[in-house]
Amino acid sequence: MTEMDYREAYEKEKERCAYLADKLSQVEWERAALQSKLDFIHNSAFWKMSKPFRKIIHFFIKQGIRLKRVLHPRDLIKKLKYKKRERQASLQFGTASFPDPATAKAQRETVFERQIRFSILVPLWNTPETFLRDMIESVMNQTYENWELCLADGSDQDHSYVGRLCQEYADKADGRIVYRKLARNEGIAGNTNECYRGATGEYIGLFDHDDVLHPCALYEYAKAINETGADFLYCDEATFKNGSLDNLVNMHFKPDYAPDTLRGNNYICHFSVFSRKLLEEDPELFRTSLDGSQDHDMILRLTDRAERVYHVPKLLYYWRSHEGSVASDIEAKPYAVEAAKRAVADHLEKHGFTHFQISSTRAFPTIFRIRYQVQDNPKVSIMIPNRDHVEDLKRCIDSIMDRSTYDNYELVIVENGSTDREIKEYYSQLLGYDYEKALPEAMEAGRTGKPYDRGVLTAEASAAAGSRVKIVIYEGDFNYSRINNLGAQYAAGDYLLLLNNDTQVITFDWMEELLMYAQREDVGAVGAKLYYGDHTIQHAGVVIGMGAHGTAGHTHYRHNFQDLGYMGRLCYTQNVSAVTGACLMVKKSLYQQVGGLDETFAVSLNDVDFCLRLREAGKLNIFTPFAELYHYESVSRGTDTQGENAARYEEESGRFKARWKLLLEQGDPYFNPNFTLERSDYSLKLPDSVR
């Protein structure tokens, strides 16, 4: 480029930045005006009087029933029946899940090769008597009996009964309860560190003073350690209210270890148990400067060092919700949010990240969005297969050019058999010259040597689209994998972005959001959040084994775009097994390393197969909800599920299941086995008795 070209580009960028700044200012002004109106409404007498009615309406919204359908008796009854089944099924994780006498006896008599001694650390501070008794008795009732309970008490003089109660139980526990009264309260972190100083076990467990353990918790952990050699373990958990373990709310069935998921949300939390050896490098278990989020900090540090992080996919920890607890309201401990941000920031810095931003999301104050800095200015090749459908392609490309804030990209349109006059005219517009006249010469110069490769046409620098457009000519039967592989051979970018022609960009920084993850050495594919035209979700990550064919399915499918998702999962970046090829970014070198898309999967499952091969190569696949696009799915190729299409899908799904048989049997590590694979909404598996 000449100096004049650079100057023109600079002026164009300045103009665009000014335009965006103006739009942002306008949006902020409109937001302030709307907030003023909202404040007026909230302070009105009518708003206050209508509170009971709004609660009823919000109840139905939370149940996922659209208001316009609430009055339909059939739909309402169906939804309420399902919620009743869910409630009945959830009871199996309360006291009904406790072992019967015969099972408890068998577990107590089990002798493992390694009879692990667990030290359970509980910091005490003004603990209510009922909570204290429930907590201690849940440890004493463990079916695995090689444990010690380390209690450090920072209670004030008005709560001296705490010490008396602890001593009462210590007298019954054959020396397994170690109680220490502290001279002063050191906070959660400090009191826990005092517990740790008196611990003698090989493995350390962290337990809150107002919570309850399942009777089989330590047995399951001892069993897992003996079978897997795990040095860090955690389990599923639930919050209970009104003092009853049969009144469970917010049951949290977790994925296996997922580093990006953990950075955005401390999903591991309870019941964390780990080998003492992981603490050899640390002078203290908890950092007192991070009180309120000391567990997130500790989990980030120790999982980094662990050789084997193991998830016990059973609900073994009960988190009590009461006034003043974080389980009830994070606003009870506002300092916890800032502490959590500092914990994540320290962790990222240790991993070499120097420029990033951490902010709370709408799901929960301690569920974070992390923005990483894009390194350098790599070129992104956006590969768009296309046949006819000029309106779809134009909408897609216009949205890329009009909304993208990342500027170093090229468009690689892989043309495969268009016949419409309009699309050829549009190609000419993009290229800056007559597409049909130039086509014969391009087809003579096809460079890859593939029989379906008929060359490439490149836009002139003076064209409206600049010189960023290439049209690759593919000739032959439709094969999505082969088409993209051909496009990749002509791509000049360091990164490939597979994109369907029936998509439309929503968020301005969508490319940066994908690129900030794709640039990492440990990352394979990165996918976006896609919506149908009616604002329901089409894609938010792929789970293997889900769906009628048992191959793969999209989670939160057809949920409203405003939904938070299961435990906020639609609001933060996380690791997944696969993402859809409708919008998928990957390093070009990595694409080539694993052989691109498998061309034997002509239409279906090629993207999932590709992502699993990246996983097989030791890479993490990532879904980010902050890169958003519309996806008018199947507009281009139709939705025919009969005849030849159905037979082809059966053949491809059968081959997929054969290739990935072991992974499918093991289950998706990012999807809990307590969920049914028949639905995409994180519904629990229902026992036969309540189906």
Image (cartoon, helix red, strand yellow):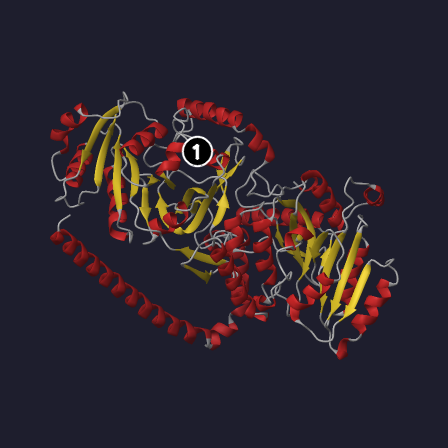
Q: Quadrant of residue 157?
A: bottom right
Q: Is residue 310 above or below residue 154?
A: above
- In this view, the residue in front, 558 or 71, is 558
Q: Is residue 412 above or below residue 191?
A: above
Which x, y percent locates residue 676?
59, 40
Residue at image x 46%, y 45%? 622
Which x, y percent locates residue 583?
37, 42
Callout 1 secondary element: helix
Residue at image x 36%, y 52%? 374
Q: How many marks?
A: 1
Q: Quadrant of residue 323?
A: bottom right
Which x, y percent locates residue 285?
65, 60
In the figure, is residue 329 to the left or right of 145?
A: left
Q: Give the residue type at disc 1.
A: Phe
Local packing at callout 1 (Cα closer than 10 Å; few below 14, some 14-19, many 20+) is many
- In this view, the residue in front, 483 or 292, is 292
Q: Is residue 372 above or below residue 659?
A: below
Image quadrant containing the C terminus? top right
In the figure, is residue 542 to the left or right of 336?
A: left
Residue 583 makes an appearance in the image: no
Residue corresponding to mark 1: 610
Which x, y percent locates residue 426?
18, 38
